[in-house]
Image (cartoon, rainbow, N blue to C red):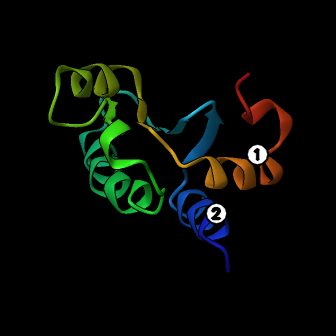
């Protein structure tokens, strides 16, 4: 199984959708607004999924609606948990583009 296939498998098994483009990969999961248990589950899963994405270390950043920021409150209120990772290696992105549906690829 390739790195991309493993990433897609882990993300989708955990209920996350994937969107990618340029040098950014995003994972998103919907849950019932206000459901702290579902939010905590998302917050505990994203790291293990995004760590599978190879990045250029000096150009990479992770940001979104995790529990370590005010974005976490927004996720809890909206029921939409999103994390992004930038600086993704071009080879990984090229393979990911081949595997994702057209509407999952941002141009």
Say the numbered circle drawn on residue 4.
2
Residue 36 is drawn in which quadrant?
top left
- Indicate left or right for 90 with 65 as reference: right
Circle 1 residues within 10 Å: few <14, some 14–19, many ≥20: some
Q: Position of residue 24 (x, y in %)?
A: 53, 34
Q: Residue furthest bottom?
A: 1
Identify the residue under disc 1.
Answer: 97
Q: Residue at x 45, y 39 (%)?
A: 87
Disc 2 residue crowd, few under 14, some 14–19, many 20+, Cα 10 Å: many
Residue at the left extreme, as displayed: 68
| Quadrant that contains the C terminus | top right
Question: Considering only order in the chain, which callout, 1 or 2, is on the residue closer to the N terminus?
Answer: 2
- Looking at the image, is 17 positioned above or below residue 13? above
| Res 69 label | none
Q: Nearer the viewer, residue 56 or 93?
A: 56
Helix, strand, or loop for circle 1?
helix
């Amino acid at each position: 199984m390739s790195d991309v296939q493993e990433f897609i498998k882990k993300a989708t098994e955990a209920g996350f959708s994937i969107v990618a483009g340029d040098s950014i990969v995003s994972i998103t999961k919907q849950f019932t607004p206000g459901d702290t248990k579902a939010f905590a589950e998302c917050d505990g899963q994203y790291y293990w999924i995004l760590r599978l994405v190879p990045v250029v270390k000096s150009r990479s950043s992770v940001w979104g609606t995790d529990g370590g920021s005010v974005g976490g409150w927004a996720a809890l209120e909206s029921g939409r948990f999103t994390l992004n990772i930038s600086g993704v290696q071009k080879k990984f992105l090229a393979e990911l583009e081949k595997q994702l549906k057209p509407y999952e690829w941002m141009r």
